[in-house]
Image (spheres, rainbow, N blue to C red):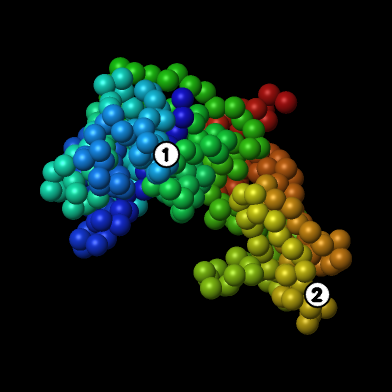
Amino acid sequence: MSVWRLQTNTKEAQDAGYCADDCADYCIKNNVAALGFEKNVAALGFEKYELLTKVNSSVNALAKKIQPNDLIWMRRGGKYYLARITNKSYWKYDNSKKAKLLGVFNQRTDVKWIEIGDESDVPGALTTAFIRGHAMQQIKKPGISEYSKLIYDKKAKDDFRYNSTIEWSEENFYSLISPSDCEDLLYIYSYKESNYRYVCIPSTNKIATQKYEFVAIDRETGKHIYYQAKNGNIDLNADDYYKLIENSDSDEVYLLTTEGNVINAEKHERIHVVGATKLFNFCCDDKNKNIIPAKIRCWIEFAGGYNVQSEK
């Protein structure tokens, strides 16, 4: 069983003055998963389709790789939708004017979309899966398959059930929480480690600040603390962040990457690397429960994390 995500922002729709939400509306209304590419498929006929699918991976995925009981995610207007591929589902080329205009002529039928919720209701690894990539591609991040099956069982109104469970692990935890959740955790960790001296400055949390996510101030000394957190396989170079504090004798930097490495940190005394495992254990410790944001606590409880800690 695989989990996929569908991007509905087709070139054809853009050229015709439509948007991704228009394509998503079409999919929801017509119970299909659909995308563009290779309009000449109608002239080729299905017997030559095997040759065509070697040209485009998204068409190939939609028509041949997706199997019954696979799940597909789609996004519309900030809301996330989920659908299951049934045994009745098949590929077809829709030659209608509307399908061509929106660029949704390659279709997988018998796909009933279920509204799940907004970004606060779905894992961080799912939201980031929509940032780039092919129109149709598989999501292989830890925990996403288990979450998708669990939420389908909860929301679907049919008789099909996956009866899945999710294993509590560090990998699954970081897939469930979002990049912004990692930023919050990094600050909360340093806040407690500093004996609650570090006060965050909300106005410093700007998209334009590429070298740090936000800044805090030590309420006793006035020194600045810069934070950078990356959720994923992203390497950080401490040398890049030393420039933030080189003109000060006391300012500090906190760095986190959940799957990557921080290089050259040993060269800089005031640059602190917080390991993903250390932060995971901090977050899951029942003693810190009251200072963990509610959204993150929900993910811990969803995967049974606090129950695991209680059993130890």
Q: Nearer the viewer, residue 284 or 35?
A: 35
Q: Residues within 10 Å of mark 1 (few under 14, many from 20)?
A: few
Question: Which SS class for mark 1?
Answer: loop
Q: Amino acid at mark 2?
A: Ser
Question: Which SS class for mark 2?
Answer: loop
Spot occupied by residue 185 in the image (x, y as percentages of width and height): 63, 52
- Residue 54's tag is 1
Residue at position x 41%, y 30% in the image: 65
Q: Amino acid at mark 1?
A: Lys
Query: In front: mark 1 or mark 2?
Result: 1
Does residue 228 appear to the left or right of 22 in the view shown?
right
Measured Cα–Cα span from mark 1 to mark 2? 58 Å
Give the mark, 1 or 2, whose residue is nearer the N terminus: 1
Residue at position x 58%, y 72% in the image: 209
Residue furthest to the bottom in view is 247
Spot occupied by residue 109 in the image (x, y as percentages of width and height): 25, 31
Spot occupied by residue 84 in the image (x, y as percentages of width and height): 34, 28
Residue at position x 75%, y 57% in the image: 262
- Residue 250's tag is 2
- 135 up-or-down from 71: above or below: below
Spot occupied by residue 34 in the image (x, y as percentages of width and height): 28, 41
- 122 up-or-down from 204: above or below: above
Q: Quadrant of residue 277?
A: top right
Q: Nearer the viewer, residue 45 or 175?
A: 45
Q: Residues within 10 Å of mark 2 (few under 14, many from 20)?
A: few
Residue at position x 65%, y 54% in the image: 234
